[in-house]
Structures are given as structure tokens and as C-alpha cells.
Image (spheres, grey):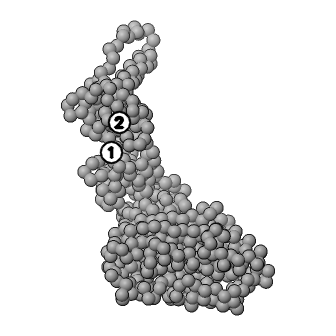
Amino acid sequence: MLKHLSSALGLLPCRVRVPSARSLARSFPCSGTMERAVVRCLPGELKLTISFCLGGSHKHMLRDQGEALGKVLARISNGVAKGQGKAKKAKKTGQQPPGPREPTLVKLYHDGAEVGDAVLNSEAWKDGAVLQVGDVKYWVQRNPPTLTTAELPASLLAGYPVCPHLAVEFGSLQDCEYCWYKEGAPSPSSAAAEDPSSWVKVGGLRVYTPSNQDIGCRLKLVCTPKDGLRSGLSKELVSAGAVEAGPGACTFDARHMYTAKGTEWPAVRVVSYNILADVYAQTELSKTVLYPYCASYALQLDYRQSLIKKELAGYNADVVCLQEVDKGVFADSLTPALDAFGLDGVFRIKDKQHEGLATFYRRSRFNLLSRHDIVLSVALTSDPMHSELLERISTNHTLKERMLKRSTSLQVSVLEDLMVPGRKVCVANTHLYWHPKGGNIRLLQMGVALKHLSHVISDVAPGAPLLFCGDFNSSPASGVFQLIAEAAVPRQHADWSSSGADESCSMELRSAFPPFLSACAQPAYTNYVGGFHGCLDYIFIQPDHMQVEQVIPLPSHQEVTTHEALPSVAHPSDHIALVCDLLWAPGHQS
């Protein structure tokens, strides 16, 4: 099915970093009568940089903003003289030494007038000025749109969107120009990457989805950074490897038929998904014990990320809550990909961990007003609102210590509905303690989370609905589910003694909220691995604030088990995404 895929796994990503104007200068053509000199000068910084091509070499000067222009021009002139002296020494011996040379004329002009030597650098180097070095003139660009990061992913699969990782300074990714090319037949005398005639233009958008006709071809992206009508230097990226065949039918393909179009206000599409952190997928335990049925290449990060990005893009969601998000995956993969599809995101890493929680929201629908993230164990001991619960568990030292060792976080984002200014929604995202015998710990974690959320809403968003998503590691029979769905859990619940008598701490625990509704009901399972399957993930809503318009059907059991279990070549995680469309309840729509 994936005949050529294994060869792609060894490919390194095509990565270009442009951390400073020095790198920009390396892209300058060293020919022509009017070349470019790029000046980076920001208010509040002590230094500015001047970058240009001189005599076939790239110059990068770091100077004080408060320095007089004359000193910089003299430095350039001296540099020219030194360069000429070195060139003479490199010639054969026996040649007559050159006589004294006239200093090279170096001047700066603006609007046709020479800029005085006493003018400070910060004022002298204006956009549109002309730097003259001998017979060569340079057009000065001050703070032009500049690509600071530019890279293509390593894995290119037919049918899966290629989302470049781009960052631009002094510009906007929305304004940038994008030209995609695929490798054609090279001319007999040139390598394909260097022969313009061997590249065929195939796209003009920020994201390109290769077709089966692109299999076996490398891709090239030419990106021109822009800010309105201002343009910077283009950057050309060529993929390290060729487009490979995709995996065929995936578990989410049929689901995308329900989400081909985005929602129309006032509907809101919500996704909650544990995407399986790479730090867990790549362990020897995962490969040999947890997921021995999964092909090794299908556990590789690049492969799974290709599937995840296509899956998430196809849901056209307004709010996306993700769990088990590697820090690097958030920054280098998900953020650039989902940004290209109109979503902004925030990240909360677990303490002393390499993965955490991510919440994305469609920027045309919502504005992020504030964040109120906490580590549940830290909040329990540091926030007076939890003093009663802390006092109750302090009677059991073993349980208390176990609870305080957990790094479980709660990510809380208050969003404003841009269609109805002033209307807010509180989005919570969490991933509770995983241990099968940790039901008592999860109950305590949920008690802290609900009280914190109640105070957040009361303090910053009175009356706002709570949308609570996550991997709760709790079945519908659990105490956590009962606490959320019934607003209370009795002291007799079995979860209080889930880890044995030594850690038992039976108590009645009440929610700070009325009962919630599981928007996607209680599926047979949201997690399906070789030795376990069960419903652990939920999107909880307040039924008096929001109503369910549609639930996107989960993959069929046949689809889930085609490759025995999850993850697989057709599914990137051991969990299944929950997707639903919600409506503001009557009385809350305006």
C-alpha cells in the first residue's frame, strides 16, 4: 500500500533559517546597477544592521543607532580598500606592487540630496535612500518584509496538504505571495533544481496538496514576503525528497463528508482529540507492547503529522482542543499548518514534561481575551479557594503526596464571539491522570478544575457558557463522569478506593456547576488499542447555554479494526477525535 514510503522516513526536512539580515544578504544578486542594501533598525534597540553585496562578497555590519553616519561610510570605504589589497596579494609573485589607491567614494543620498556625515544612523538610513559605493548604487530597504523561518516538511504524501513552516518579520503571512512548482523533466545539461525550465507551476496558495500526478517529483516553493504593497526578498525552498504515495483510505475520510463546509453563525464546530505525543509513540514499550501491530513507519512523527494535519484541516472546526501535543509539534507543525487554515492557537506544556495541551480557535469567529491555565496540584496547595479540599485529603498523607506529584494541567481560554461583541465562552481543555487505578486522583483533579473554572467565569466572564473538552481517562461509570454529569459524587463511589485502602479518602464531592451534557453522548470507545478499548474522551457542555446541532459519526468498527487497532497506517493516534456542531441555546444567541 505504501510501496515507497519507507524511503521517505529517512529524509531530513528542508529547512532554511533566516535569523538575521546577514542571511538575507546571502540571497542578494551581486550584479546589476541598482542592488539592495537591507537595513534592520527598530526603535528601542541599540544596534542596527546593514547588509549588502560588495565585490562578490556579502557584508553584514552591526552599528550603533546613535553613531554618526560618516563613521559607517568610512568603514565601508576602508573595507573596499582592504579587499582590493587582498586581491592583489593573491596574484602571482613578480608583479609590480600597486601604487597608492584613491579612497573609494561612499555616499548616502535621500530624495536626491546627500545625507550629512553628522546625521545619526537611526535617522540616516531611510527607506528608499540610495547608498553609493564607487560605481555601484544600492537601493536601501529599511525593515522590509523578511522571512525569518522557512521550511518544508520532510514527508510529502499525495492527497495530503503540504503546509510550510513560515515566519515573517515586518510583514504578514496573509499578504505573502506563494508559487508552488513540481519537478519536471530536467534539461540534458542541468540539474533539475538549477534549471528553471524543469519546474512546472502547480499552485499559488499558501498550502499545496500534491496529487497522484506529483508522485516521484520534488516540490519547490517560492515565497515572497509582503506587507501590503511592500515586498521583501523571495526565498526559494526545494523539498529534500519526492512526493510519495498516500496511505489510501483513512478513518477520517468519511467523516470529512459531514464537515466539508465550515459552520454558519451561530453554530460552532468543536473538536477534541488526543493526538498521541511523539515522545510516547517512539518508546520501545509502544513499539513492542502497546502498538506491536502498527507498522513502524506509521509511528514516525512526520508520517503521523501528515495524517493529523489533513484530518484537522478537513473538520473545518471553530474550536480545537488537543491533548498530548509535543512542544516541537505545536511550534513547528500544527501552528503553521492550522494558521494557514485560519486558526490561531495557544499551548500549555505540562510541568517537567515535553508535551501538553493546545487550544486553537478560528480567528474570523473568535478573539482570545484571556488565559487562566493552572497546574491542578499546584493550585490545590496555593489557592485558598481549594483549602477545604486540601484539608480533607491531608488526613491521608499517602494520597496527598501522590496527588501533589501529578503534573496534570488545565488549560483555560476565554474567547469572545466576534459576531456578537461582548459575548464570551470559556473553553477548558485537560488530560487527567492516566493510571487505571487512579480514579481517586482523577476525582480530586476534577474537583480542583471545576472550582477554578467557576471562579474564572465569575471573575472575568459572568454568564459565559463553559465548554469543557479533553481526555478525562474516565469511563461513563467513573466518579469523574458522575461528578460532571450529575454535579455530585457520593462517598460510597468505588473510585475513592481505586488505588487500595492505603490511599482511600471517601468523601462527598460536589460540582461548582449544574450537570453537564456529553455533547457526543457515550460512544462505545474513543480509545482503541490492542489490550483496551473504552470511552475516555468527552466534549461537555452546559445544556442551558448550548445545544447539540450535529455529532459527526465516529469511524465504523470495521474501519477502526481494519489494521487490528489504533494507531495504524490509516489513523495517526490511539484515540479518535470527537467532533460536533453546537448552537447557542435560545436566550443566549444575542
User: On the rendered structure, is 510 left or right of 425?
Assistant: right
Q: Residue at point 49% right, 59% down?
A: 331
Of the residues shown, which amino acid type is indicated by label 2?
Ser
Which is nearer the eye, 587 or 16?
587
Q: Is residue 439 visible?
A: yes
Q: Which mark is residue 373?
A: none
The amino acid type found where label 1 is placed reads Pro
In whole angstroms, how far apart are the C-alphas of marks 2 and 1? 16 Å
- x%, y% of residue 490? 66, 90
Place residue 213 in its image quadrant: bottom left
Residue 305 location (% of width, % of height)? 50, 65
Q: Quadrant of residue 342?
A: bottom left
Compared with 395, 31 (above or below) is: above
Return the disc, 2 or 1, that comes first in the chain's sequence: 2
Say whether residue 1 is left or right of residue 267: right
Q: Nearer the viewer, residue 110 or 51?
A: 110
From the viewer's perspective, is residue 468 above or below residue 152?
below
- Residue visible at 40% across and 9% down in the picture: 97
Looking at the image, residue 348 sits to the left or right of residue 550; the answer is right
Closer mark to the observer between disc 2 and disc 1:
2
On the image, the x and y values in percent for residue 226 come to 30, 51
The residue indicated by pointer 2 is: 122
Quadrant in which the C terminus is drawn: bottom left
The local secondary structure at tag 2 comes to helix
Q: Which residue in the protein does label 1 denote?
A: 144
Residue depicted at 44% across the width and 78% down the height: 462
